[in-house]
Amino acid sequence: METGEDSNKEERVSKSALIAMIAIIVGLMVVATYANWQNADRDRIETTTVTHFTPEASASPSSTP
């Protein structure tokens, strides 16, 4: 039968796994912050200019060569 100390030892997370999980969480936080910043500044970054294009009338071909 396992004692309380043995069962507690098996459930512990290794230090390297804990560091890896923290690094992943920090990375996701950085990506989320960057995405929200991009979304907030989208109107300033992405602008669309619509211009009305009216083609000029081309000269009609002359009947005399």
Image: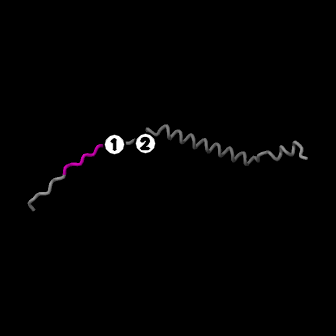
Q: Is residue 54 magenta?
A: yes
Q: Position of residue 2 (x, y in %)?
A: 89, 46
Q: Residue at x 54, y 41 (%)?
A: 34
Determine whether, in the image, residue 10 is placed left or right of residue 41: right
Is 34 drawn above or below residue 65 in the view shown?
Answer: above
> Could you tell me which secondary element the residue under label 1 belongs to?
loop
- Looking at the rendering, the stretch of residues picked out in magenta corresponds to 49-57
Q: Residue at x 10, y 59 (%)?
A: 63
Residue marked by disc 2: 46
Query: What is the spatial separation of the Cα atoms under label 2 and label 1, in whole angstroms?
Result: 13 Å
Q: Residue at x 86, y 46 (%)?
A: 6
Q: Is residue 30 magenta?
A: no
The numbered dot on residue 50 is 1
Q: Residue at x 16, y 53 (%)?
A: 59
| Residue 53 or residue 38, whichever sits in front | 53
Marks 2 and 1 in Cβ contact (< 8 Å):
no
Q: How many marks?
A: 2
Q: Position of residue 49 (x, y in %)?
A: 35, 42
In the orientation shown, which residue stands out farthest toward the left?
64
Q: Position of residue 35 (x, y in %)?
A: 53, 42
